Image (cartoon, rainbow, N blue to C red):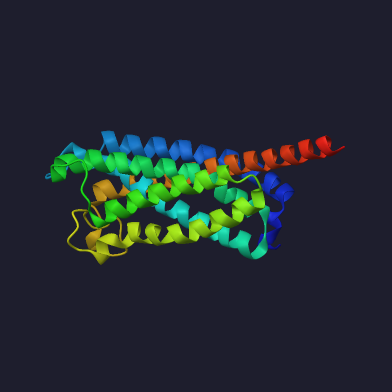
C-alpha cells in the first residue's frame, strides 16, 4: 500500500474517520492524567515554588507550536511537488491550531517568567523568534482568506510557510545559538543530565502525549471539514453553471 493513497480525499475521509475517535479518547485520557498528576501530585520546586507546574502546559504547547509549523512545511512541500489537495488542506487546517498553541505558550511563558525574571516579557532571542512565528501563523491564515482561488492560495501560503520555517527553527534552537538569553535550556533532552527531575519528567511526558493526540484529533477534524467545504463549493459552482 502506498502512502500517497491517503492523498485521495475519499481514502483520507475513511481512514481519518477510524482514527479520530481513538485520537480524541487518547487526548482526553492523557491530558487528564498528565495535568492532574502534574498539578496536584508533584511537589513544589525548591527554587521556583509552585510556578514550576506551568511546565505541564507551557512546554507541550511550545513544542506543538513549533512542530505544527514543521508539519505544515512538510505538507506544503508535498502540495508544491505532488499537487495533492489533501496535503494543502491539512496545512490550512493545522494553522489555527498552531496559532492557538503559540498563544498559549506565550501567555504561560509570561506567567512563568514574571516571578522568575521579574518581568512579563523580555526581548530574549527565543521569545522574539517565537513572537515572530506567531505573526507568521496570523499571516498564513490571512493569506488563505485573502485569495479566492484555492490553488493559488495554496501555492502562496506554501512559500510563506517555507520562509516562516526559519523562525520555527530559531524558536527551537535560539537557546543554543545565543547563550546570553534569559530563557533557560531545554526541559527535555537526550542528555539525561539536562532533563528536569524525574518527579516532573514523567507527568510532563504524559502531558506532551496528550497535546500531541489533541493536535492529531483536531487536525483530522478540521481537515475533514475543509474537504467537505471544498466539495460543497464545487457542487454549488456546478449548480450555478447548470
Viewer-side residue, 122 vs 35: 122
Viewer-side residue, 239 vs 17: 239
State left or right for residue 78 relative to residue 14.
left
Residue 217, image quadrant = top right
Q: Residue at x 60, y 51 (%)?
A: 153
Q: Is residue 166 visible?
A: yes
On screen, residue 39 above or below 10: above
Q: Quadrant of the N terminus?
A: bottom right
Q: Residue at x 46, y 54 (%)?
A: 69
Q: Is residue 42 visible?
A: no
State left or right for residue 223 relative to residue 2.
left
| Residue 233, image x, y percentages | 72, 38
Q: Residue at x 71, y 49 (%)?
A: 9
In the displayed image of the protein, which residue is found farthest to the right? 242
| Residue 210, image x, y percentages | 43, 43
| Residue 106, image x, y percentages | 31, 43
Q: Residue at x 36, y 51 (%)?
A: 132
| Residue 118, image x, y percentages | 13, 42
Amino acid at each position: 500500500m502506498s502512502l500517497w493513497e491517503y492523498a485521495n480525499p475519499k481514502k483520507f475521509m475513511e481512514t481519518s474517520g477510524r482514527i479520530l475517535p481513538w485520537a480524541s479518547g487518547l487526548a482526553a485520557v492523557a491530558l487528564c492524567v498528565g495535568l492532574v498528576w502534574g498539578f496536584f501530585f508533584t511537589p513544589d520546586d525548591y527554587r521556583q515554588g509552585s510556578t514550576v507546574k506551568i511546565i505541564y502546559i507551557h512546554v507541550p504547547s511550545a513544542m506543538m507550536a513549533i512542530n505544527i509549523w514543521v508539519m505544515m512545511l512538510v505538507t506544503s512541500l508535498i502540495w508544491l511537488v505532488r499537487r495533492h489537495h489533501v496535503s494543502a488542506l491539512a496545512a490550512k487546517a493545522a494553522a489555527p491550531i498552531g496559532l492557538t498553541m503559540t498563544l498559549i505558550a506565550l501567555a504561560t511563558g509570561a506567567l512563568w517568567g514574571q516571578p522568575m525574571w521579574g518581568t512579563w516579557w523580555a526581548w530574549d532571542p527565543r521569545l522574539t523568534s517565537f513572537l515572530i512565528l506567531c505573526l507568521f501563523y496570523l499571516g498564513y491564515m490571512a493569506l488563505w482568506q485573502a485569495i479566492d482561488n484555492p490553488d493559488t492560495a495554496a501555492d502562496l501560503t506554501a512559500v510563506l510557510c517555507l520562509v516562516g520555517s526559519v523562525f520555527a527553527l530559531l524558536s527551537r534552537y535560539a537557546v543554543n545559538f545565543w547563550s546570553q538569553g534569559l530563557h533557560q535550556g531545554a526541559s527535555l533532552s537526550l542528555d539525561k543530565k539536562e532533563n528536569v527531575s524525574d518527579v516532573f519528567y514523567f507527568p510532563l511526558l504524559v502531558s506532551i502525549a496528550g497535546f500531541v493526540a489533541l493536535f492529531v484529533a483536531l487536525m483530522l477534524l478540521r481537515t475533514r471539514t475543509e474537504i467537505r467545504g471544498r466539495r460543497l463549493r464545487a457542487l454549488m459552482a456546478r449548480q450555478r453553471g447548470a
